[in-house]
Image: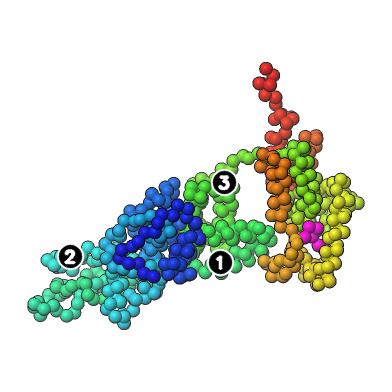
Amino acid sequence: MRHSNIRTTAPENLSPRWPDGYVAILREAGAQEKTIPYCIGWVRRFFARHPGRRRRDLGRTEIESFLRNLATGPNVTNWQVQQARDALELYYERFRGISLDPRPNTTVSHDPLRSEKHSDCATESTKSPDCHAEALQSKQAITTYNKPNADDKQNYSRQIPKRQFPDAGLNRTRNMPVANQSFQAGHSAKQEVRPANRMGKSYSENAHFETTAPVRVDRSPSVHKPAKPLDWKALEAKVIEILRLGHYSYRTEQTYVGWIRRFVVFHAWRKPSLLGADDVKAFLKHLAIEKQIAATTQNQALNAIAFLYNKVIKKEIGDFSDFQRARRGMRLPVVASREEIKVIIGRMQGREHLIACLLYGTGMRIHECLSMRVQDIHFDQKRIVAHGKGNKDRYVPLPARYTEDLRRWLEHRKSLFDRDQATNMHEVELPDALSRKYPNAQFSWRWQYVFPADNYSTDPRSGHVRRHHLDEKHLQRAVQQAVREAALTIRFTPHCFRHSFATHLLQAGRDIRTVQQLLGHANVETTMIYTHVLDQGPMGVISPVDTL
């Protein structure tokens, strides 16, 4: 599909789906799959330059300003500027249905979302004159020369043409107009040839500049060659390798890789080694102002980018002392009363009912409870080993009220293990390198998950197909259903069982150090937040209005 001289605007889209709807428009326009991520990156960079403004309020003036600023940057070629122009026009006119003003100084049609093939047309001297003329016209659609009148060619011959955008090639050069070697009819054969100018070219006095092909003149040798495009697969593999060498959790691995990918996409897939502190600040500003993410999420993104530069690229990106970090607000935990806890647990059944009872009775996190092994339950000592964050283990109490229920559940779990063993599918994941140190441990009963998944799944790290532990979404859905049935108005989630556990222990008179150890907090200040929700003690004052 090609753009015509008269572009059409689609009906206004009142509920655009970004980016899926925009990707569909790009494919309809004939864009190649490999260029679609770049087009999305151009649109995001354009809106990042105008934070706080509505997208429908931006138009042709802002687009041309963005393209002029883009063209002055390093390692930006003609076809990249043209690709950004087409991406923005397709976004407004075809995706959003918002018409734009006509292009300035544009009289020639061109291919939308063109790639490097167009620049190759201008670099090969063996191409036909039509190919060179098309390349010159497409450049004029972006930036035009100040062309002289017929009477002003003598003065124009002394001038150096304005800088064009650098083409995509091995050497960064300028396209210089060359005098036609043939004489036009009616002119004398004797021409005065002026001395060479500072670019090393001489121009005849009456030479014209419109029908000849451009000649590539090398710039100073100090200018480096254009950087190769980013190999995302290689960068992703390097990040994952260093994360696993540091024994980061799989969730941290997913989070860091996700933020690093968003960072490079925001900067149009440029190599992070070519970016600096200003580029990092621009990305964080985009997250805070346009995306309006929370302070903790912004700090998480900054930690991921800092890991990329400190551990992976090993490059000092500058000083961040003048950058205002997002301030974390104070949010009180949601704590339910004993009656509300009883109502919620009473409306849950089966496996999810037992998990909810253990969460409230032990204070474990959701992942700690779901990843619990058979050997972690000590019935005689009435305790459970909880494997917390940062590879830190701790003991939590085993509620005597649910001891028999847990024993019956393990009997059911043993029968499932026997069926898996009969089909040779009883392998389980082991932490770190225990599978090499103890080759038979991954097939033993004591290493099995207490709450397994219903089906087998593929391990994203090793590729082994086996039964993993239960996914959190099953418990989350069961809790939300129970809250709706109980008609509670509090925003209760499975993690609120842990908040209620700590608060109710403090209400019962337990010291805060004991609660800190049971929760696995490294700092007692983290546990102190539960004192703010107590209905007794220093913070549980009686309002003066109640004494009237």
Residue 525, above or below 310: above
Quadrant placement of the N terminus: bottom left
Callout 3, which amino acid? Ala
Residue pictured at 76% horizontal, 41% vertical: 343
The residue labelled by disc 2 is 148
Residue pictured at 88% horizontal, 51% vertical: 404
Percent position of residue 91, x then y: 42, 59
Percent position of residue 135, x then y: 31, 72
Residue pictured at 64% horizontal, 57% vertical: 252
The quadrant where residue 98 appears: bottom left
The quadrant where residue 312 appears: bottom right
280 sits left or right of 142 in the view: right
**Camera-nearest residue between 307 and 403:** 403
- Mark 1 or mark 2, earlier in chain: 2
The residue labelled by disc 3 is 295
Callout 2, which amino acid? Pro
The residue labelled by disc 1 is 235
Range shown magenta: 446-452
